Image (cartoon, helix red, strand yellow):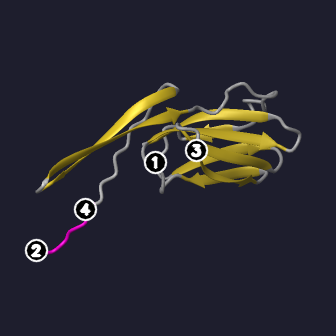
Amino acid sequence: MPFFEVSTTALHTYTIAGTMRVCATVYTTCGNDIYCTNVLITIPSLVTSPSLSKEEVKVYPNPANDELNVTGVMENTNYKLFSITGSCVSQCILQQGSNSISMRVFASGVYILEMTRADGQREIVRVVKE
């Protein structure tokens, strides 16, 4: 009998931080197995240093599909994009003026965009990927 490998990805967006019990059940012709583990869900800190002016920087569309536009950047600004679990999924530098961040490779869900200028000023924006 041939061997077939099936890969399935499950996705769940948590709206609160904490330790969550996550279980997966694998069904085969021989029966099933259940694997459970505790997962620590963290959200990047929303307590930051003084923020960039909200009138300067615009982040759109939100929710986003393929691309997230960031305009009004006054100087080169580092950014990090975090998943809702706190993992950094993308980071780079926003150039002065207008920029776009590709969202194509990310699963649907909630992300946190953290932009930090050289002087330490930060802006944090919640972004939804459709």
Give the residue type that dot 4 points to.
Val
- First of labels 1, 2 by sequence position: 2
Task: Say what secondary structure mark 4 lies in.
Answer: loop
Real-space Cα separation, disc 1 to disc 2, in angstroms: 42 Å
The residue depicted at 25 percent of the width and 66 percent of the height is 5
Q: Is residue 111 magenta?
A: no
Quarter holding the C terminus is top left
Residue 6's label in the rendered image is 4
Pointer 3: residues within 10 angstroms few (<14), some, or many (20+)?
some
Q: On the image, numbered disc 2 is attached to which residue?
A: 1
Q: Is residue 28 left or right of residue 102?
A: left
Is most of the magenta stretch helix, strand or loop? loop
Q: Are marks 4 and 2 in contact (CB under 8 Å)?
A: no
Give the residue type that dot 1 points to.
Asn
Where is residue 15? Give x, y as percent.
47, 27
Residue 87's label in the rendered image is 3
Q: Is residue 3 magenta?
A: yes
Q: Are marks 3 and 4 in contact (CB under 8 Å)?
A: no
Real-space Cα separation, disc 1 to disc 3, in angstroms: 20 Å
Real-space Cα separation, disc 2 to disc 3, in angstroms: 41 Å
Q: Are marks 1 and 2 in contact (CB under 8 Å)?
A: no
- First of labels 3, 4 by sequence position: 4
**What span is colored magenta in the figure?**
1-6
Real-space Cα separation, disc 3 to disc 4, in angstroms: 26 Å
Q: On the image, numbered disc 1 is attached to which residue?
A: 65
Give the residue type that dot 3 points to.
Ser
